[in-house]
Image (cartoon, rainbow, N blue to C red):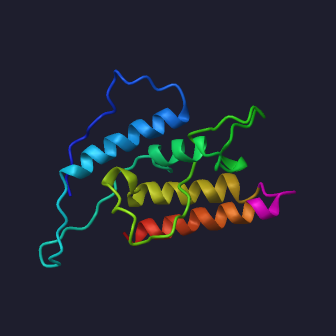
Amino acid sequence: ISLPYIPVPKQVAVDSAEDRFKSLDERDKVMRQGITKNSDLATASALVGTCPDMCPEKERYRRQYQRLLSSFEMKDDGSGDVDHNKCISEYSRSSADKEEPLPHEVRPTAVLQLTMEYLCSAVMDIGEGRWGDWYEFIWSRTRAIRKDITM
């Protein structure tokens, strides 16, 4: 599926994570309007991810405003602010009522490898004193990587 890039309108004031998420969600709804599903396996094409980040932008803002971010995704200064460079896509179960992801919501192989390398080098050895949170974080993020690989 090849889709044109549709930016979030500049006239929309985005003051909070919730506002940003809603703007991105509206953009995705507009993008989905032009998609027709191909149910013929002979002519169907594989989904090629184009997300350049370890976590898609819309997911980062959704989890930020819903307060679902892990402590491993926060800035090190103790401010409690999100560090968007540390955010990693969280596993979410597939279901029939979920829409098929858009290409910018799926990470390509190179980003998946970068994400796994980041987990191994920056997160794997910092669980001291918070092993439960650490285990859940590693398990969820590696499961999300496996899910993206199979898409």
Residue at point 59%, 53% (across, down): 118
Q: Quadrant of the C terminus?
A: bottom left
Main SS of residues in magenta:
loop
Residue at point 40%, 61% (across, down): 109
Give the tally of numbered discs: 0
Q: Residue furthest right?
A: 129
Query: Residue 117, image x and y in percent?
Result: 57, 57
Residue 28 in the figure: left or right of residue 121: left
Query: Residue 114, image x and y in percent?
Result: 50, 54
Q: Quadrant of residue 125?
A: bottom right
Q: Residue furthest front?
A: 97
Residue at point 46%, 26% (across, down): 14
- Is residue 108 or residue 93 the one in the foreground? 93
Query: Residue 38, image x and y in percent?
Result: 17, 69
Identify whether 52 is placed above or below 13: below
Query: Residue 77, image x and y in percent?
Result: 76, 32
Residue at point 50%, 69% (across, down): 93
Identify whether 120 is placed above or below 76: below
What's the magenta region? 126-133
Identify whether 79 is placed above or below 124: above
Q: Quadrant of the N terminus?
A: bottom left
